[in-house]
Amino acid sequence: MISQAIAFPECSSTCPRVARLERENTGLKEEIAVKDKLIERLQCELRKYKNPHTPPSRRLGSSRRRKRTPREKESKPRRGHEGVTRPRPKPAQTRVVREKRCTNCGMELGEPSHTETRVIEDIQEPRKVKAIEFEIGHYECDGCGEKVVAEHEDLPPEGRFGNNVVVQAPLSKYEKRLPHRKISDLLRWEYDLDISPSTVLDLTRRAADWLRPNYKKILQEVRSADVVYVDETSIKINGRKGWIWTFTTDDVTLFAIRMSRGKGVLKEVLGEDFHGIIVCDGLSSYAAYIKNIAPGSNLQRCWAHLLREADDLKSEEGERLANRLHEIYDDLKTFLLGDPPPEERGGKRRWAEAAVRELTEDECEDERVADLIGKIKNGFDHWFTAITEPGVELTNNRAERALREHVVQRKIIGTLRNEKGMRIHETVTTMLATWKQKGLDPYEEMHKAIRS
């Protein structure tokens, strides 16, 4: 019957089995079409979180480790790491521990048969708030008539709370990652200081205001730098999408929060007279900035972004392109580690340009490969700046690392409420990042900044 159905299609109307199979086939095709649409929608959703523009540190599932067996969980020293014992501190006091009666039968005990010593390290009990009254002298100069008000390093410019309290608020928020409510709880538990979450916010505002002159000094250092690593990531501002920019040099790191991702931010921060090199990704704002606003500057495009896009290509053509780009990058990275002289740098750049140009001249059928080759061509002059400019890196990893803390903070705070919150966030985080970059203690440096 089946062979007859194949030879004579019209028999499907009289053959029940053929008719049933045709109905099943139609139904299966409809199910497949529905599932294809669902797969396409899910793939689009997945690519929001896992795509070539997502750094490996932020890719979902990239940090998942296999479960270790109980045997593997046993404490083992790291290879090449010599074990050390915590040094025994010198005790500030000695307490004698004796027992009068036997804990078993209650009989009175005499002198101990022997003694042992144990040194423990402990923190002091919570310290209570200390109220200090300042009697401030006001003067009028007999020579010029100027009115002078006496100052003291422990007397803050405004408010009822001293420097130590003010310092605790921003450090707890941006170093310990605590919300204002928990900072309020912490101050009450540790110091018996009862202040509201809104007061904690105002304390961070005061600290940011007093740190703002230092922020402006860092801004000037960024503008005069020879090399600046720049990147940006989104952050919500009153529910709207804004951007937090980072500008990192060898010595300082500056953050600026703006509603724009365009070249206007670069103009505002770096200015029109910037003559340094910007290490960045492929965002068009950077090319527009050096072309239309600061023609004396230059770009170094990030190779890490390029390699991630190449690795995302799954076709045979894409794999060949990715492998060759990795070979060129590894060669350049090894070459630059030796800090070669200018004449060698020039020759290496010519070699790299020729090698990459050869890749862009190959014809390809894969549309995604063609798109990536187009990107390489469009930014061709900016892939090789680091080769001939000492002190410039091939990747923008510095700026990406600087933004990682903000990615974590973004998940905690959800959104900044207004311009005041933007100003506080960018000011305090700029100072903390710069102090750490210089190997300084944030607590001590914030005290110095407020007292000055």
Image (tube, rainbow, N blue to C red):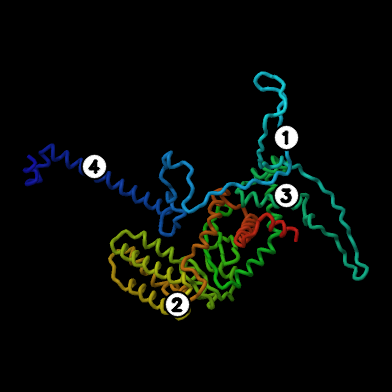
Mark 4 or mark 3: name the one nearer the start of the chain. Answer: 4
Q: Amino acid at mark 1?
A: Val
Instruction: List the residue tagged with mark 1.
Output: 96
Q: Nearer the viewer, mark 3 or mark 2?
A: 2
Disc 4 and disc 3: Cα gap in Å?
Answer: 71 Å
Q: Position of residue 98 (x, y in %)?
A: 71, 30
Q: Is residue 66 left or right of residue 175?
A: left
Disc 4 and disc 2: Cα gap in Å?
Answer: 65 Å
Instruction: List the residue tagged with mark 3.
Output: 165
- Whether pointer 4 and pointer 2 mark residues with C-beta atoms closer than 8 Å, the reply is no
Label 4's element? helix
Q: Is residue 120 above or below residue 339?
A: above
Residue nearer the viewer, 261 or 103: 103
Residue at the bottom extreme? 343
Q: Amino acid at mark 4?
A: Gly
Instruction: Say how many tags the image has.
Output: 4
User: Which quadrant does the C terminus fall into?
Assistant: bottom right
Residue 78 visible in the picture: yes
Residue occupying image coordinates x 37% and y 49%: 42
